[in-house]
Image (cartoon, coloured by chain):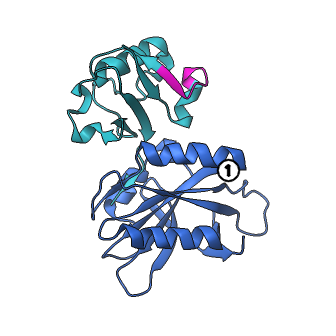
Amino acid sequence: MVRTVLRISATAFAAMIGHCYDGLPLEACGLLGGRAAPGAAGRATAPATTVDVFIPCRNADASSRTYAIGPDGWRKADEILPPLGLDVVGVAHSHTHTDPYPSPTDVAKADNPMLAGWHYVIVSLRDDAPMVRSYLIDGGNIVEEPIVVVDA
Amino acid sequence: MPVDVRLPTVLRQHAGGLATVKANGDTVRAALEDLVLQFPQLRGQVITDEGVLHRFVNVYVDDDDIRYLDKLDTKLSGAETISILPAVAGG
């Protein structure tokens, strides 16, 4: 798998962390609106996907162990992103008591051609400070990518 | 009375580019079968050939996941909106 970078705007990053804390004691989730990385061929640097907008979504599972994005979240994405020329490029969710690493359920659910190329951001709230990591997950392969927070 | 069925972006290409279509049926299964009659390219994309919900999608009646209702046998009165969504979920 090609090495990539996730560049996320400071506004989206702060909104994502805030939404995860607001969701406690449940897992929180939201869609990432941005632009997918262009092809990597012939590039000197790792292709960067940008995230400009965080779309907070209700956890349709209303659970502290699992999450699902329901129709309300997708409706918001459909309203907000197309006028900005952005697409859904991934999803963020919190782990309330565990590492910021994909769980077996995360990996199983990511095995979905409808979500090809998606970026999976996990926000762990286990410790005093949030731990945020991003992954590409493909057919059971988990590859972490660096997150760069950029000024909007 | 037909219900509205909202399609995810990736499936709209199989439904003439439409985001929302009408389907008839008094259960979710019947409405989804009617959807496939109208748009044969959707066959196998939502309900598998074995007759179960495809694991790549989640189906909601209004704001409720049918997994927590009566699954594909969930009854419809005609006033609902069915949403077919990519299964974005995890633990």
Residue found farthest to the bottom: A128
- Badge 1 sits on which subunit? A
Residue that appears at 28% across and 29% down? B52
SS under mark 1: loop
Residue that appears at 79% across and 60% down? A42
From the viewer's perspective, is A138 left or right of B82?
right
Residue B18 painted magenta: yes
- Judge whether residue A58 can be spotted in this image: yes
Residue B10: give x, y in percent of width and height: 55, 35
Residue A95: give x, y in percent of width and height: 36, 70
Number of marks: 1
- Judge whether residue A85 can be spotted in this image: no
Mark 1 nearby-residue class (10 Å; few <14, some 14–19, many ≥20): many
Q: Residue A36's image quarter?
A: bottom right
Residue found farthest to the front: B79
Q: In the rendered image, which quarter contains the N terminus of chain B?
A: top left
| Colour assignment, chain B | cyan
Residue B46: give x, y in percent of width and height: 39, 29
Residue A110: give x, y in percent of width and height: 43, 52
Residue situated in front as seen by the camera: B67 or B52: B67
| Colour assignment, chain A | blue
Query: Mark 1: which amino acid?
Result: Leu
Q: In the rendered image, which quarter contains the C terminus of chain B?
A: bottom left
Span of residues in magenta: B14-21
Residue pointed to by mark 1: A86
Residue A59 painted magenta: no
Residue that appears at 64% across and 75% down? A148
Residue situated in front as seen by the camera: A30 or B1: B1
From the viewer's perspective, is A134 left or right of A129?
right
Relative vertical location of residue A106 with respect to residue B10 in this rendering, above or below: below
Relative vertical location of residue B37 with respect to residue A139 in this rendering, above or below: above
